[in-house]
Image (tube, rainbow, N blue to C red):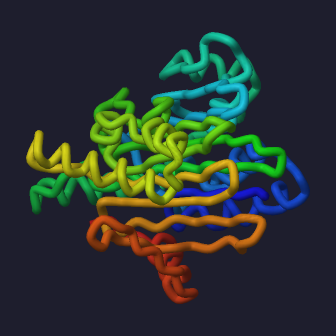
C-alpha cells in the first residue's frame, strides 16, 4: 500500500509526477519533494514558490518544511528570498542533528553554500497582483491579506515510511519577516511512521493556536481514522476560536495513516484536495461541512479546467 494526499487542486499535477515514484517502490520523501517542487515552479499558483504573492514591501518571502516520520528528522526555512524550491532546502536541513530551522539571511547563506538555485521569485504577474491590491485597499478598504493557500502534502510509501512537506509564500502583503504555521513542526505539518501524517493550510496565526497537525496525528494514534481526526481537530478549534475571540480564520487539514487511509476537513466551503493511492487514481475532491461531517465530492473535469483557466488568465493592471 502507498498513498499521497495534498491540499488544494493546485497539487494535482505535482502528484501526477510523484505517483510513478511510489508505484515503483520509491520513497515518500522523494515523492513529496518532487510533487511540491512542481507546484513551486508553476508561476500561476500565486501562493507558492515562483510567482508567489509578495509581502507589503513587494518582496517574495518563502516558507517550507519537511518531516521524516520514521527518523522524526525535521528541516525548515522561513522568510527565505531569491531561492527556488525551498522544499528541497528544507529537506536538506533535515539531514542534520541541529540547525534544522533557518530563517531569513541565515537560510539564504546556507542555501548559497549548498549550491541551491538562486532565482528572482518575483514575477511580473505577481507585481500586477500587488499593485492592484494596493489600489483595492485605497478604493474599497479590502483586507490586504486575502490569499494564503499553502501546498501541504503527506505520503506513505510501500515500505511504510511516512513523510510530510509544506511550501508557501504566506499571507499576501504580510509584514516583512512574518512567519505562519507552514514551517512550524506540529502546526503546519507532522509525521510519525508508527501512526500517520497530517498537514494544514489556512490562517497560520490561528492554525498555530491548535498545533493542528500534531493533534491530528495524536488522535489517529488513539484509534481515530484520518477523517475522524481531521474533523474533530478542525471543528473543535473553529468552535474554540469563535468562543474565545469571536471569529476563526480558515482551517483546512489533510491526513493519511500507515494503511493509506486518508481524510480531510475544513471550516470553509472552498477547500479542495488531491489524493492518490495504490487502489485509487489521482483524484481531486471539493469538500464542505454538513453538520459534524465533511462531504467530499469528486471534482468534475469542467471544474478542474476552470480552476486552471481562472489562474492563468491574462491580468490587467487596474
Q: Nearer the viewer, residue 215 or 7?
A: 215
Q: Is residue 62 visible?
A: no
Quadrant containing the N terminus is: bottom right
Q: Nearer the viewer, residue 230 or 85?
A: 230
Q: Is residue 18 visible?
A: yes
Q: Is residue 186 left or right of residue 117?
A: left
Q: Is residue 196 left or right of residue 148?
A: right
The spot of residue 76 in percent (x, y) is: 57, 28
- Pick out the residue farthest to the right: 24
Residue at horizontal 77%, vertical 45%? 160
- Pick out the residue farthest to the top: 98
Residue at horizontal 78%, vertical 49%? 157
Write down the quadrant of residue 33 in the picture: top right
The spot of residue 292 in percent (x, y) is: 30, 65
The spot of residue 276 in percent (x, y) is: 68, 66
Write down the quadrant of residue 135 in the picture: bottom left
Q: Nearer the viewer, residue 115 or 181?
A: 181
Q: How many marks?
A: 0
Q: Is residue 32 left or right of residue 54?
A: right
Residue at horizontal 32%, vertical 69%? 289
Q: Is residue 133 left or right of residue 86?
A: left
Residue at horizontal 62%, vertical 26%? 74
The spot of residue 216 in percent (x, y) is: 46, 44
Quadrant containing the C terminus is: bottom left
Write down the quadrant of residue 75 in the picture: top right
Amino acid at each position: 500500500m502507498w498513498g499521497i494526499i495534498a491540499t488544494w487542486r493546485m497539487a494535482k499535477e505535482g502528484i501526477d509526477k510523484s505517483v510513478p515514484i511510489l508505484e515503483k517502490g520509491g520513497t515518500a520523501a522523494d515523492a513529496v519533494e518532487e510533487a511540491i517542487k512542481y507546484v513551486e515552479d508553476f508561476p500561476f499558483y500565486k501562493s507558492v514558490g515562483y510567482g508567489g504573492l509578495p509581502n507589503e514591501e513587494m518582496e517574495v518571502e518563502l516558507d517550507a518544511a519537511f518531516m521524516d516520520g520514521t527518523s522524526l528528522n525535521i528541516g525548515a526555512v522561513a522568510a527565505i528570498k531569491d531561492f527556488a524550491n525551498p522544499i528541497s532546502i528544507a529537506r536538506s536541513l533535515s539531514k542534520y542533528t541541529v540547525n534544522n530551522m533557518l530563517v531569513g539571511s541565515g537560510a539564504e547563506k546556507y542555501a548559497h553554500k549548498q549550491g541551491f538555485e538562486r532565482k528572482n521569485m518575483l514575477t511580473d504577474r505577481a507585481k500586477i497582483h500587488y499593485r492592484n491590491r494596493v489600489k483595492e485597499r485605497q478604493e474599497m478598504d479590502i483586507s490586504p491579506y486575502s490569499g494564503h493557500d499553502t501546498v501541504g502534502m503527506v505520503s506513505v510509501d510501500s515500505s511504510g515510511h511516512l513523510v510530510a512537506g509544506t511550501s508557501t509564500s504566506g499571507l499576501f502583503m504580510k509584514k516583512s519577516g512574518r512567519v505562519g504555521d507552514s514551517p512550524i513542526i506540529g502546526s503546519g505539518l507532522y509525521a510519525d511512521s508508527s501512526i500517520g501524517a497530517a498537514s494544514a493550510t489556512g490562517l497560520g496565526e490561528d492554525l498555530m493556536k491548535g498545533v493542528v497537525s500534531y493533534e491530528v496525528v495524536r488522535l489517529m494514534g488513539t484509534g481515530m481514522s484520518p477523517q475522524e481526526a481531521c474533523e474533530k481537530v478542525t471543528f473543535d478549534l473553529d468552535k474554540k476560536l469563535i468562543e474565545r475571540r469571536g471569529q476563526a480564520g480558515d482551517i483546512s487539514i489533510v491526513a493519511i495513516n500507515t494503511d493509506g487511509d486518508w481524510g480531510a476537513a475544513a471550516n470553509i466551503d472552498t477547500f479542495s484536495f488531491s489524493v492518490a493511492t495504490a487502489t485509487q487514481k489521482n483524484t481531486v475532491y471539493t469538500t464542505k461541512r454538513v453538520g459534524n461531517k465533511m462531504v467530499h465530492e469528486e471534482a468534475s473535469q469542467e471544474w478542474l479546467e476552470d480552476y486552471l483557466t481562472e489562474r492563468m488568465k491574462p491580468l490587467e493592471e487596474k
